[in-house]
Amino acid sequence: MKILMLYCDYFAYKPTTKNLEWAKDETEEKSFENVQVAFVQIESHDSEDVSSSVKKLVNFIKWVARKNSCEKVILHSFAHLSESKAEPEITKDIFDKSELKLINGGYQTSQTPFGYFLDLDLKAPGFSMARVFKSF
C-alpha cells in the first residue's frame, strides 16, 4: 500500500470519465474545506490480509489527521504510486471498510467516486505535515 496524504485548505472534484464498467454512476461535483485527502494505492500484496490493510490505512490516516488537527478525511483511489495494483474490487472493499472505521472513530469521511477519472481542484498549504507519504 502506498499513501500520499495532502492537507488541503480546499479540495474539489468533478467526475469526468467512468473507467470501471461496474462502478456506480456518478455525476455530482463536491468540494470540501480544511480536509485531509488520502491518495491511496492498494497493492496486490494488500489483498492477502484485508483486515490488516484496513487497520494500517486507518491508523496512518488518523495519525496524520491528528497531527494536522483535522477531523475531515477524503479517501481517493490513486493507482499511480506503484506498479503493483490490487484488483479493483479488493481496493473498493478496503476503502469501504476504512471509511466505516474512520466514521466510527469520529471522522467526517467520504470517498471520491470509485472507478472514475476526476477533474481535481485543490489548494494545499506549505507546512511540514501538509504532505506525508507512507509505504506499507
Image: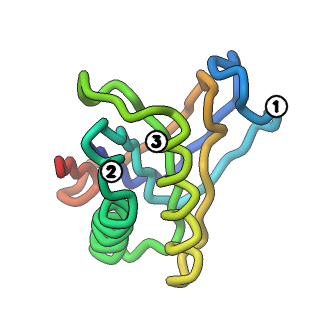
Q: How far across and how far down the image is residue 82, in percent?
A: 24, 28
Residue 125 in view (yes/no): no
Disc 1: which residue: 25
Quadrant into which the N terminus falls: top left
Q: Is 14 or 75 nearer to us in this picture?
A: 75
Label 1: element kind: loop
Residue 80 in view (yes/no): yes
Residue at image coords 18%, 51%: 136
Disc 2: which residue: 5
Dot 1 or dot 2: first in sequence order is 2
State the mark number for residue 123. 3
Q: Are marks 1 and 3 in contact (CB under 8 Å)?
A: no
For residue 66, which quarter of the picture? bottom left
Q: Nearer the viewer, mark 3 or mark 2?
A: 2
Residue at image coords 40%, 42%: 39
Dot 3 or dot 2: first in sequence order is 2
Q: Are marks 3 and 2 in contact (CB under 8 Å)?
A: no
